[in-house]
């Protein structure tokens, strides 16, 4: 395989993973609208707090083992040591199942004080009881989602990003269906209290994981049988289980530390915003509403560009691991350039569109209720859409390249920055303080990561910045004419369908202008390694 083909294989794997996450996130957007309608904006704060703990506990339960499974399976398969790769799968899955059970028990015992702490002294007994119920419903997901992630890690290590992507889409589809169907029946048909819509939204995460595990056991059976044949045909024995277990832990623990510290932003917001905001003069209900808008509504919209984080973080692991095994510095530099240039090229127009067209996007998604506040928060949240997409990729790159200690130190510094700046920014800027402190935290990781990669791999930061600048210029050239058009033909914020059609047409125009201007500036040619550029070629490359 040629060097260029290898680079394209990394991009193909990363973009396949990203596309699967994109579809799952796009499906995820569908449930936010009806869930807001069923539950009400105030109750969305319960969802925000519970989901923050879910995200944190999922990382603790997994303990970085899916990441370790992917890296180690890729490593031993490249050496044609299939028996050791199979041992990695068995030991990794057993570790995850044991951790999930322990974490579920500890969380169950500590759920009551956590519920009281998250809502603060101003909370009503009914609100505390609702949050406590949600924490207990969450236990189903805490047990089954980590097991599902171990299955994904194995196929990720085999570079079967198609199976990885399909499972993500299926899981999200089941989850969205359960949220919408159960919420509608309980709240609209049976007239249960609106908080039951949030109960169903949390229950759906566990149900979706269970059904997706069934899919894996059935749909991926042929791939599993082929792998087992390779194991049976191999001469010799696997490496000692003690050695493999030690390697799993040595790779996994730094990753879980990185993941744990990486949740500092949402965790600080979920635990401190409502109590601190009420202390500095913000009304309790207003603070609950702002928390729900930022951590659910804005976060869901920003999750569309953040699919690049999950896709590239998943796709880069087996390829960078292989290059590192061969100690191919040149190839590592090329792969790093491919990763970050592709992310910046795709991300630049999305972030700027969120910033400049926040009212239209928020209205289309959530209607006219709290439009002014929601649009203002979303516009500023574009900073987080940028920083929180790029920073986790840096962390994944550093861990894969075995700079685990550095990755942990960088995230500890960033977490301290988040914690200290949070109280200052909330005091100065109110609800915007959550956004500013989270973005600053992530930019710290990006800056430190760039310095480390430049020092150890002679990574060409200047070339990356040139691509970023040309991408931003191209995006501004696409956005400015549409802003001018909206000055004379403003969007209609009274009819969502009409607004959707109008903005959808403008979105197509902006994409075409962006691709055209960036081609003149030779950005896609550099990013996708194309001598000559055409729409047909780039669509063919993405389709492939």
Image (tube, grey):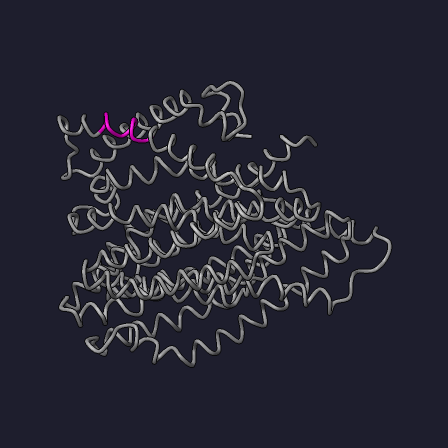
Q: Give the residue drawn at x 30%, y 72%.
A: 118
Residue closest to the eye, 319 or 501: 319
Task: Decide which of 246, 291 is in the foreground and name it.
Answer: 246
In this rendering, position of residue 457 left or right of residue 375: right
Residue 42: percent from left, percent from top: 21, 62
Q: Quadrant of the C terminus?
A: top right
**Rendered view: 164 above or below 279:** above
Position of 420 relative to 125 (above/below):
above
Viewer-nearest residue: 381 or 29 = 381
Question: What residue do we see at 61% from left, 42% from top?
Answer: 332
Rendering coords of residue 46 (x, y %): 29, 66
The answer to whether residue 131 is left or right of residue 396 is left
Q: Is residue 480 magenta?
A: yes
Question: Residue 309's spot in the image, x, y percent?
Answer: 46, 47
Answer left or right for 444 relative to 219.
left
**Image quarter of residue 267:** bottom left
Residue 522 pos. (x, y %): 44, 23
Q: Residue at x 51, y 57 (%)?
A: 211
Screen quadrant of the N terminus: top right
Secondary structure mostly seen in magenta is helix
* Residue range (magenta): 475-482
């Amino acid at each position: 395989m040629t060097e260029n083909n290898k680079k394209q294989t990394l991009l193909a794997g990363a973009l396949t993973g990203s596309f699967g996450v994109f579809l799952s996130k796009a499906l995820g957007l569908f449930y936010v609208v009806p869930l807001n309608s069923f539950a009400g904006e105030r109750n969305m704060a319960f969802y925000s707090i519970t989901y923050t703990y879910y995200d944190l506990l999922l990382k603790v339960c997994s303990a970085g083992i899916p990441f370790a499974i992917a890296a180690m399976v890729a490593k031993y398969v490249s050496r044609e040591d299939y028996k050791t790769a199979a041992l990695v799968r068995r030991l990794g899955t057993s570790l995850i199942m044991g951790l999930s059970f322990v974490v579920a028990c500890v969380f169950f015992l500590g759920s009551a004080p956590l519920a009281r702490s998250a809502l603060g002294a101003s909370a009503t007994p009914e609100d505390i009881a609702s949050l406590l119920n949600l924490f207990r419903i969450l236990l189903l997901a805490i047990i089954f989602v980590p097991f599902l992630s171990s299955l994904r890690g194995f196929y990720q290590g085999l570079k079967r990003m198609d199976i990885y992507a399909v499972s993500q889409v299926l899981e999200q589809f089941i989850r969205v269906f359960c949220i919408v169907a159960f919420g509608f029946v309980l709240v609209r048909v049976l007239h249960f209290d609106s908080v039951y819509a949030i109960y169903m939204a949390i229950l759906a995460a566990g149900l979706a994981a269970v059904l997706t595990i069934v899919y894996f056991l059935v749909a991926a059976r042929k791939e599993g049988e082929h792998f087992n044949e390779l194991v049976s045909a191999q001469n010799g024995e696997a490496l000692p289980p003690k050695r493999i277990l030690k390697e799993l832990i040595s790779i996994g623990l730094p990753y879980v530390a990185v993941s744990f510290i990486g949740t500092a932003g949402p965790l600080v917001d979920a635990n401190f915003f409502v109590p601190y905001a009420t202390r500095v003069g913000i009304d309790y209900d207003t603070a609950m509403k702002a928390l729900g808008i930022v951590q659910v509504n804005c976060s869901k919209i920003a999750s569309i560009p953040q699919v690049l984080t999950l896709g590239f973080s998943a796709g880069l692991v087996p390829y960078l691991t292989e290059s590192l095994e061969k100690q191919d510095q040149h190839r590592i530099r090329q792969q790093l350039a491919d990763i970050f240039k592709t992310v910046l090229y795709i991300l630049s127009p999305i972030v700027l569109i969120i910033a400049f067209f926040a009212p239209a996007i928020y209205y289309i998604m959530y209607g006219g209720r709290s439009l002014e506040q929601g649009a203002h928060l979303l516009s500023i949240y574009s900073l987080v859409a940028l920083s929180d997409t790029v920073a986790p990729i840096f962390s994944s790159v550093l861990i894969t390249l075995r700079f685990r200690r550095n990755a942990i130190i960088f995230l500890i510094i960033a977490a301290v920055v988040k914690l200290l700046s949070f109280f200052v920014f909330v005091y100065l800027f109110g609800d915007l303080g959550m956004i500013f402190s989270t973005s600053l935290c992530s930019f710290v990781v990006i800056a430190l990561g760039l310095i480390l990669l430049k020092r150890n791999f002679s990574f060409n930061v200047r070339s990356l910045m040139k691509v970023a600048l040309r991408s931003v210029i191209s995006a501004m050239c696409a956005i400015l004419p549409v802003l001018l058009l909206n000055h004379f033909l403003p969007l209609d914020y009274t009819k969502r369908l009409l607004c959707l059609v109008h903005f959808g047409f403008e979105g197509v125009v902006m994409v075409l202008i962006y691709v055209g201007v960036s081609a003149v500036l030779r950005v896609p040619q550099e990013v996708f390694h194309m001598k000559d550029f055409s729409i047909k070629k780039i669509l063919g490359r993405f389709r492939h």
